[in-house]
Image (spheres, grey):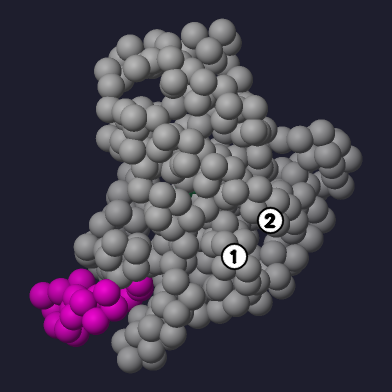
């Protein structure tokens, strides 16, 4: 059977633009965004900045670019940032800040709930001494591995910021999932951060785009870096029109979360699969699938099912995963062992 997005559990990045997005894209008023002339981009940037309670925003091509621009704007050559050793911006972004910005990472172990021990982070801050890189920034990720950080963590971050003077960046690729989980506003979740990156192209369903928000002077620096990196784009309103619809659709993530719960329960009912259901908080399920993965892969592909089999296997629920998708997956898995 051929590929079907309804049976693609690999990631929420596989989501496709809906009819409403495609229509908005076709009709979007556009201009040259490098000149600051694209009304649809400007409106999106304005709207997202205001919704997050920040001064300014920059619409960019990807979450990787957005995080990179944030680090380059907070740090100078020879500076460093502290982050989790599992942080996407450290582990999965090709070392961009080191390669392109001469900014070194100082990774540290994370707690099981995804938080960083901020006392330990403080001890990693290097003294002002010519032997050391200058520690400038702490990067936090929320959600991380599908887990929303606890609301109380914000107070600890606030105290950390006050006592250390470091800037705080949030890789909030899936911060909308965290807001839905906690039932709070995005603004409340991001208040303590100096910059925030949000992916619009994951569970929110835009075809392309992330957005970086923060103080106006920081975003102005990021805009300059974006141009240098070849990320200045022209009639990008075509993409911003879809991104705006995605951003306004945040509440619909609740359905993905409910389906992820159901998926976790039903996977657990199969005797060769185990899932720690206490770790299923948003749209991700991590399953240990104990069988021959090559044989399983062949069987799944016969039915058009896409999974990233691994140890563990991550299954991601998104807007194209319906009740029927889950029924089909469970039915096929039930036949393999
Ligand atoms: C996906 C992701 C990114 C990067 O986004 P891309 O658009 O794929 O470059 C950054 N951080 C986190 C936590 C992500 O999940």
**Mark 1 touching mark 2, by CB under 8 A?**
yes
Residue at the image position 21 percent from the left and 77 percent from the top: 120
Task: Say which quarter of the image contains residue 333.
Answer: top left
Q: Which mark is residue 179?
A: 1
Residue 286 drawn at (x, y percent): 38, 42
136 falls in the magenta region = yes
Q: Secondary structure at mark 1?
A: helix
Residue named by callout 2? 250
Task: Say which quarter of the image contains residue 335.
Answer: top left
On the question of residue 14 being in view, the answer is yes
Q: Secondary structure at mark 2?
A: helix
139 with respect to 111 (left or right): right
Residue 57 drawn at (x, y percent): 64, 65
Residue 270 drawn at (x, y percent): 39, 30
Q: Earlier in the sequence, mark 1 or mark 2?
A: 1
Q: Residues within 10 Å of mark 1 (few under 14, many from 20)?
A: many
Picture layout, residue 203 above or below residue 154 = above
Q: Residues within 10 Å of mark 2 (few under 14, many from 20)?
A: some
Q: Which mark is residue 238?
A: none
Residues in magenta?
117-138
- Per the model, the C-alpha gap separating discs 1 and 2 is 9 Å
């Amino acid at each position: 059977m051929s590929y079907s997005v309804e049976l693609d559990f690999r990631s929420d990045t596989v989501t496709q633009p809906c009819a409403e997005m495609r229509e908005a894209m076709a009709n979007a008023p556009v201009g040259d965004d490098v000149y600051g002339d694209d009304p649809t981009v400007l409106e999106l940037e304005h709207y997202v900045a205001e919704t997050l309670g920040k001064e300014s925003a920059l619409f960019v091509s990807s979450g990787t670019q957005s995080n990179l621009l944030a680090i380059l704007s907070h740090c100078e050559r020879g500076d460093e940032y502290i982050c989790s050793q599992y942080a996407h911006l450290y582990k999965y972004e090709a070392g961009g800040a080191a390669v392109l910005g001469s900014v070194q990472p100082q990774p540290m172990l994370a707690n099981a709930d995804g938080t960083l021990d901020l006392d330990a982070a403080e001890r990693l801050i290097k003294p002002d001494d010519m032997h050391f890189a200058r520690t400038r920034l702490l990067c936090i990720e929320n959600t991380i591995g599908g887990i929303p950080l606890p609301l109380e963590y914000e107070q600890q971050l606030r105290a950390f910021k006050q006592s250390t003077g470091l800037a705080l960046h949030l890789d909030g690729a899936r911060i909308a999932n965290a807001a839905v989980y906690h039932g709070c506003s995005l603004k409340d979740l991001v208040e303590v951060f100096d910059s925030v990156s949000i992916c619009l192209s994951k569970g929110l369903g835009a075809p392309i785009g992330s957005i970086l928000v923060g103080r106006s002077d920081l975003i102005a620096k990021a805009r300059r870096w974006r141009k240098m990196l070849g990320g200045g784009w022209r009639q990008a309103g075509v993409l911003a029109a879809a991104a705006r619809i995605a951003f306004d659709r945040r509440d619909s993530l609740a359905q993905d979360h409910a389906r992820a719960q159901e998926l976790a329960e039903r996977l657990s009912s199969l005797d060769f699969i185990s899932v720690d259901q206490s770790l299923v908080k948003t749209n991700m399920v991590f399953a240990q699938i104990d069988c021959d993965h090559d044989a399983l892969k062949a069987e799944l592909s016969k039915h058009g099912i896409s999974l990233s089999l691994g140890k563990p296997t991550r299954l991601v629920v998104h807007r194209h995963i319906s009740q029927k998708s889950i029924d089909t997956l469970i039915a096929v898995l039930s036949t393999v062992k």
